[in-house]
Amino acid sequence: MLQLLSLSASDFIRGVGLLGVCFISYWVIPFLHGLIVSPTRDVPGPLLARITRWYEFFAVLRGDSNVEYMKLHNRFGHVVRMGPNRYSFSDPRDVRIIYELGGKFIKSEFYHPLLAPKPDDQNIFAIRDPAVHKARRRKIANLYSMSTMVSYEGAVDRMNKICMGKLTALASKGRKFSLPNFLQWYAFDVIGEITFNESFRMMENEGDVTGMIDGIHKANNYLAHTGIIPDFHPWIMRLQSLLGSKGALVFLKYTLDQIDKHRVSNSKGTDGVSSDSFLAKLIALQKEDKVSMPHILDACGSNIGAGSDTTAISLSASIYYIYHHRNVLAKLRDEIDMMAHKGLISDPITFQEAQSMPYLQAVIKESLRVHPAVGTILPRKVPKGGVKLAGTFFPEGTDVGANAWVLHYSKDIYGDDAADYKPERWLEAKADNDSRDSMMLAFGAGSRSCIGKNISLLEITKLLPQIVRKLDFIFDHTGPQTYCAWFVYMKYNVQVKVRTTS
């Protein structure tokens, strides 16, 4: 305080002058360049987005950025400025160029907060170099293939039995509860059973007994914000290291304990049978020198961190929309009952059987369309030499991308009824659906699409028919609330009832 009081007038003036220089360098010059010189100067968008990234940051902070992107595209058209050097696109022609397979648009600095200091420790989702990502993905791709899903089906059946038993018990109590929260516990238990051959027992305990869900949600929230201002990430991490953070350490210790347990049991599950767990498959690859320990930790972490949220959100949305559209519920039950009567499906239903149910598959796809799990732009960097998109030249290094919510509700893509929940749209002419399919970003796009997509679909496809067949829900009258940071979480309460049939 005394030092501040001893400052002379000239010191004060120099300080103000320095702040002025910083302001001009950071705000004024970029603004004038974007307004007068840049080839993207005519791209429309909010005025604040011309001069600062904080416009989009605060949209994320409010928790409604997915809705904000939609409003902006409705107002400004197919391309919208989201920041001084960041643009969102909704024309399918531009989207295909940005995300085309084998394309040159690498991931942007948005993903920097996920990167580890050592190259071999990198999270596969955040790797920006296409060649490095392709090599890493190829080593473990078979663990996520459709043919491998059969080996995980027993784990899903075990957890589905617990899930249905728990929901039936809740029905007898007659109390309201958060179904999205319950489905988050379900998704965690299933992915634990698949990955480690051991569930987290969250459904049985009716809560996040590990603390991992809270830690993952905080991490996703952090990444959604710092991804927009990645240059602030190192400074925030230094502060975090001073304050302390134990969320990641909890998961790391749990995974290492599971690896030790697996090795001690010589690849045997707790029931004495050979383990088909995801971890067992990874350790087998490690013995063949195909993956390293950091790769094992990353793959298991990705399953838990991203897989549980995507599945829980998609199930929450599916159940909400199915039960709020009684015609859809009736048609889906008719399909299930008809196939059961003909002996075409089992109880529990197998993944292969469920895939042969056209209306069920249409319902799942429509649920993923109206409520995609990810609510942010999937940003990419314009490659060397620049590119022309939406009739405008975008220089090398510009951030471009698309938002799933914007695309999924586009009337240009899905017709005038794009805002309606209508599974029948996926049973229409194949040519129409080929075009619509290519704009579905529920699991990402191009070569960087979600590697765990099939695991998520395995869980959704097997659980939904059981719930629809056996349970009814009474929903609270407040309607669903959503919160969007990276993922778009649903919030609503239900009372569950065991279905009575004549």
Image (cartoon, grey):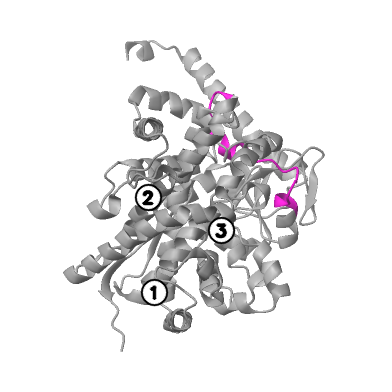
Q: Tag 1 or tag 3, which sits nearer the N-term?
A: 3
Instruction: Estimate how packed mark 2 is, as few (under 14), some (14 to 19) or many (20 or more) residues with alpha carbons within 10 Å.
Output: many
Mark 2 vs mark 1, CA separation in Å: 21 Å
For residue 77, say whether it is visible: no
Question: Which residue is pictured at 29% across the width and 50% down the height?
Answer: 202
**Horizontal side of residue 64 vs 105, given as left or right:** left
Q: 278 above or below 161? A: above
- Residue 290 occupies quadrant: top right
Residue 118 in the image: state x and y as whole percent: 56, 23
Q: Eyeballing the image, is 287 above or below 315?
A: above
Find residue 221 and report its horizontal and vertical position in percent.
43, 44
Q: Secondary structure at mark 2?
A: helix
Segment colored magenta:
97-118
Q: Is residue 482 left or right of residue 424?
A: left
Mark sitting on residue 442: 3
Residue 296 pos. (x, y %) = 50, 34
Q: Position of residue 108 (x, y in %)?
A: 64, 39
Which residue is outermost to the left? 173
Query: Is residue 275 left or right of 401 when viewed as pictured?
Result: left
Residue at mark 3 to residue at mark 1: CA–CA distance = 23 Å
Q: Nearer the viewer, mark 2 or mark 3?
A: 2
Is residue 105 highlighted in magenta? yes
Mark toward the start of the polypeptide (2 vs 3): 2
- Do the CB atoms of the residues marked 3 and 1 lie less than 8 Å apart? no
Q: Amino acid at mark 2?
A: Phe
Compared to residue 248, the image places residue 354 above or below, namely below
Viewer-proximal residue, 74 or 104?
104
- Residue highlighted by disc 2: 188
Q: Quadrant of residue 242?
A: top left
Q: Nearer the viewer, residue 259 or 200?
A: 259
Tell me the element at label 3. loop
Crowdedness near tag 1: few (<14), some (14–19) or many (≥20) residues, C-alpha within 10 Å = some
